[in-house]
Image (tube, helix red, strand yellow):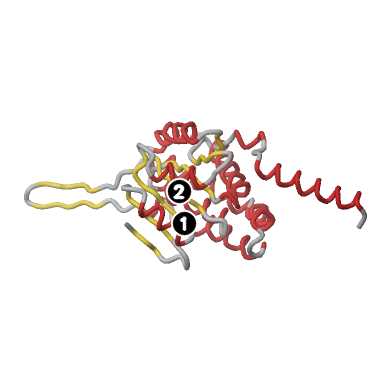
Amino acid sequence: MNQQDIEQVVKAVLLKMTASSQPDDAVHEMGVFASLDDAVAAAKVAQQGLKSVAMRQLAIHAIREAGEKHARELAELAVSETGMGRVEDKFAKNVAQARGTPGVECLSPQVLTGDNGLTLIENAPWGVVASVTPSTNPAATVINNAISLIAAGNSVVFAPHPAAKRVSQRAIMLLNQAVIAAGGPANLLVTVANPDIETAQRLFKYPGIGLLVVTGGEAVVESARKHTNKRLIAAGAGNPPVVV
């Protein structure tokens, strides 16, 4: 390899590094925002459109179809971006989450009757939920959390692992596009253009967000536990359920 070849290789690497640190113009659409404040504000507006179970069903159906349709694209992008895993395994997991994640069928209101009358117990949405997602299964986690949280009537602010930001953003954009095309609210799923550790830490204490769903390594789960007074559902190393 001569000096010219070396310079070309260095130039290509620098261009790739620059591209990975700069968001594409397109990511400022379909749920990806320049600032966290704008993302949360948009999610709050979108959540108001999920009051009916019928709308939640519509949105979830669209997400299932989009998740399965784009499962291979997202698997390939995840492996390419993170350097982890096998495309076929990630493809299978994306499809499994799109098909198998429980939806509104899991909602279970209760009715109690007695001499003193009737009591209806029905769970209410949290509103806007913050979701921290990993680099190991980025698209699958976005699909899973999107379906389960929308089923409960929530919109979602995602804080993806920085090493998987592009595949996570792509998944969020594709799912939002599908929901909008089906007649659902825009920005049910949102994130920021340049997610980092500070983004997640801000969400741990962000006003108006009452629930955190954290998927990641031990350090991420421990950080969430220590730095928030919000309700927390977390999955750490080995994916055991950790509920605080």
Marks 2 and 1 close (CB-CB < 8 Å) = yes
| SS under mark 2 | strand
Q: Residue at x 83, y 51 (%)?
A: 9
First-in-chain label (2 vs 1) = 2
Marker count (numbered): 2
The x and y percentages for residue 61 are 51, 47
- Neighbourhood count class around disc 1 (C-alpha, 10 Å): few under 14, some 14–19, many 20 upward: many
Quarter of the figure that contains the N terminus: bottom right
Q: Which amino acid, by three-letter code, is at mark 2?
A: Ser
Q: Which residue is mark 2?
A: 131
* Residue furthest out toward the front: 3
Marking on residue 215: 1
Q: Residue at x 57, y 56 (%)?
A: 135
Quarter of the figure that contains the C terminus: bottom left
The x and y percentages for residue 132 are 47, 50
Q: Quadrant of residue 15?
A: top right
| SS under mark 1 | strand
Q: Residue at x 47, y 68 (%)?
A: 238
Residue 194 shown left or right of residue 45 in the figure: right
Marking on residue 149: none
Residue 218 shown left or right of residue 90 in the figure: left
Q: Which amino acid, by three-letter code, is at mark 1?
A: Thr
